[in-house]
Amino acid sequence: MAELTGRELVASRCAKFFKDGDFVNLGIGLPLMCVNYLPEGIDLWLEAEIGIVGSGPSPKWGEEDIDIIDAGGMPASIIKGGSVCPHTTSFGFIRGGHIDITVLGTLQVDQEGNLANWTIPGKLVPGMGGAMDLCAGVKRIIIATEHCEKSGNSKILKKCTLPLTGAKCVTDIVTERCYFEVTDKGLVLKELAPGYTVEDIKACTEADFILADEIGVMQ
């Protein structure tokens, strides 16, 4: 099997946080890729804000059901035992604190665990979706993101400059270059992607961070 890189590596690493029986919400884009990398023997209940409990892997083109889509409008599937529910019930799961983990994308995230992922002032956006509810109601909030913007600027900052989605809510940050845990002492570098060094991460990260006693390798 070829070594995973880029977005595939991020999705694979995020999927390793899941435990058997977890109730999980996945944001649109990169986070949705996690369903394709679930560890063997791990059965989850994946909740989609649009009203699915029991989302499954992305179907192959030509095998999709046009009546089943994910929050990003792409083909989705429902596992055996899964169900469709109203938006009110879906958001009740989130606001009631019933979701164990959510994986979200971001525009910015900072060393205090603040998250900004819903708007850029002056630009037209469709709305914040359920991200603010997830930040307020979910126990573990994992950010899955590219380490830098297309311009090369770090997306992992000392302090977010965009309007916040949630304050001090993020627990983990996974990029194609490394994995940080967010702690009371700040960001802790826990793992490096293959081919990257600590000096590489320091060079591309605006935020301050400390090193774990043992730094692992992302897979």
Image (tube, rainbow, N blue to C red):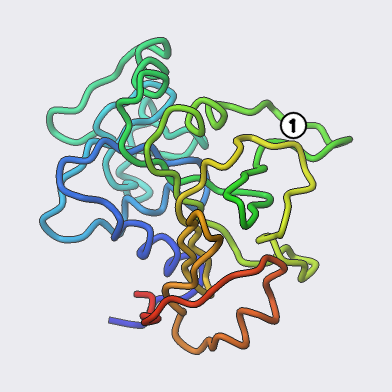
- Toward which corner of the image does residue 87 lie, by quadrant? top left
Structural crowding at the residue carrying mark 1, measured as other residues with C-alpha within 10 Å and reported as few (<14), some (14–19) or many (≥20): few
The residue identified by callout 1 is 125
Q: Is residue 2 above or below residue 109?
A: below
**Dot 1: what SS?**
loop
Q: Residue at x 24, y 32 (%)?
A: 54
Asked if residue 112 lies left or right of residue 2, the reply is right
Q: Is residue 178 above or below residue 137?
A: below
Q: Is residue 218 above or below residue 72?
A: below
Expressed as whole percent of the image width and height from the top left, the position of residue 118 reads 67, 36
The quarter in which the N terminus is drawn is: bottom left
Q: Residue at x 35, y 46 (%)?
A: 62
Amino acid type, callout 1: Val
The quarter in which the C terminus is drawn is: bottom left
Q: Nearer the viewer, residue 41 or 214?
A: 214
Q: Residue at x 65, y 80 (%)?
A: 202
Q: Is residue 53 above or below residue 142?
A: above
The residue at the far right in this view is: 122
Q: Residue at x 73, y 49 (%)?
A: 160
Asked if residue 217 lies left or right of residue 74, the reply is left
Expressed as whole percent of the image width and height from the top left, the position of residue 210 reads 54, 73
Expressed as whole percent of the image width and height from the top left, the position of residue 97 reads 35, 25
Asked if residue 18 lies left or right of residue 105, the reply is left
Asked if residue 209 lies left or right of residue 150, the reply is left
Q: Nearer the viewer, residue 23 or 73?
A: 23
Q: Report the number of numbered marks.
A: 1
Expressed as whole percent of the image width and height from the top left, the position of residue 141 reads 44, 44
